Amino acid sequence: MNVIYYQFDGYTSRPEGLQYDGSPANWRCNHVADIATATLIEDDWHEPDVKPKTRGHCVVYADYEVAY
């Protein structure tokens, strides 16, 4: 099972690093089992300037979708 999410802070192993808050380059796709830690925070909602038109090959069927 995969999860697609928008990363606005924290660590990334990508060579180009984390882009500015709002960048569509900050979309991430991971296997749920590969996520070692996650923290829920009370902060302003963050989302990209432009939302993707497709989930690509990351998510074929969406079981849940969260929107603010």
Image (tube, rainbow, N blue to C red):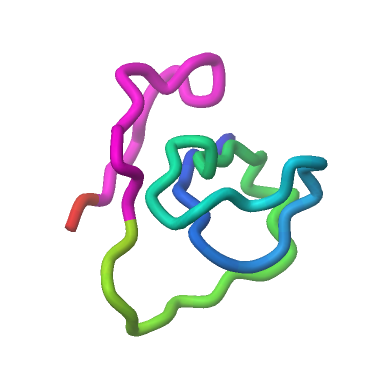
Q: Residue at x 59, y 37 (%)?
A: 29
Numbered label tally = 0
Picture layout, residue 11 above or below residue 41: above
Residue farthest along the front direction in this orientation: 20
Q: Quadrant of residue 50?
A: top left
Residue farthest along the left direction in this orientation: 68
Q: Quadrant of the N terminus?
A: top right
Q: Residue at x 30, y 33 (%)?
A: 51
Q: Residue at x 53, y 44 (%)?
A: 26
Picture layout, residue 51 above or below residue 26: above
Q: Nearer the viewer, residue 29 or 46?
A: 46
Q: Is residue 13 left or right of residue 57?
A: right
Magenta stretch: residue 60 in it? Answer: yes
Q: Is residue 30 left or right of residue 13?
A: left
Q: Nearer the viewer, residue 3 or 47?
A: 47
Picture layout, residue 26 above or below residue 61: below
Give the x, y percent position of residue 21. 44, 57
Give the x, y percent position of residue 42. 34, 84
Picture layout, residue 10 above or below residue 43: above
Give, as a single range, the part of the protein colored magenta: 47-66
Q: Nearer the viewer, residue 4 or 6?
A: 6
Give the x, y percent position of residue 17. 72, 49
Q: Quadrant of the C terminus?
A: bottom left
Q: Quadrant of residue 57?
A: top right
Magenta stretch: residue 9 in it? Answer: no
Q: Residue at x 42, y 81 (%)?
A: 41
The majority secondary structure of the magenta stretch comes to loop
